[in-house]
Image (cartoon, rainbow, N blue to C red):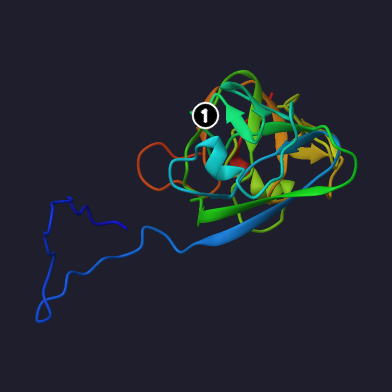
Amino acid sequence: VNEEVKFAKDAVVGSIGQPAALTLAYEEMEQVIAIDKGWNWISFSVLPLGGEVADVFSGYTAQDNDLIKGPNGIATSFQGEWFPPNYEIEPGKMYMLRRQEDGKAQVRVQGGAQSTSTEIPLSSGWNWFGYIPQEKLGVETALAQLKANNGDIIKSQNFGTLTRKDGKWLPEGKTMEPGRGYMLLVKTPQTFRYDKQSGGETNPPPQTKTEG
């Protein structure tokens, strides 16, 4: 809930005449991510509060030595637990999940929808890049707020490699989708967000970008 209620023995908050109003911090929803044997590039548009690895992956049947590799290090599954237990999953970042067992599986995540206004810091060079929108979008639309340059690259397990050239991502016609993770190479360090920023420093629209 959004309200803070401090615990005290035998305390009562509110009354019949004036009940205490509690509002949910978010409306819970579920994200389902398909997993294959081997390495899977994934990201999250739905997360539980806190984002600890055990909570995020509570809907996934992990095998011993399954690995999660991310920008903040590695977590390993052993005897039904993830180590280190304080490993945190964050929106806007890509994670690589290595599944040991044959066949297909799913990561089922219960939590709140992550905001497309989440700020994602990007450094010059390669970035482990997550997808936050709840629906599929064409690459040009999804990355409309990115300050892109000729030679920038985005890699995916589903569409391969796209390269930025003359104001376009080539080859054209590819989509980004919830649950997928991406490797993004940019020349210009920046703070990216999927929705258009208002106030302060605003990313220019694609047609006014200077690329080189």
Q: Is residue 104 left or right of residue 185?
A: right
Q: Is residue 202 left or right of residue 176?
A: left
Tell me: residue 70, above or below residue 207: above
Tell me: residue 67, above or below residue 156: above
Q: Can you give x and y, in whole percent of width and height, for residue 116 in the image?
A: 52, 50
| Circle 1 residues within 10 Å: few <14, some 14–19, many ≥20 | some
Q: Quadrant of residue 84?
A: top right
Q: Is residue 176 visible?
A: no
Q: Nearer the viewer, residue 42 or 12?
A: 12
Q: Nearer the viewer, residue 183 or 48?
A: 48
Q: Secondary structure at mark 1?
A: loop
Q: Quadrant of residue 54?
A: top right
Picture residue at 19% right of the left edge, 54% below the top? 5
Q: Can you give x and y, in whole percent of width and height, for residue 209 in the image?
A: 61, 36
At label 1, which amino acid type do we have? Pro
Q: Is residue 3 visible?
A: yes
Disc count in the image?
A: 1
Tell me: residue 41, above or below residue 189: below
Q: Nearer the viewer, residue 139 or 94?
A: 94
Which residue is denoted by mark 1 in the rendering?
85
Picture residue at 65% right of the left edge, 48% below the top? 142
Q: Can you give x and y, in whole percent of width and height, for residue 207 in the image?
A: 63, 44
Q: Is residue 173 left or right of residue 88?
A: right
Q: Can you give x and y, in whole percent of width and height, for residue 96 in the image?
A: 72, 31
Picture residue at 49% right of the left edge, 40% below the top? 51
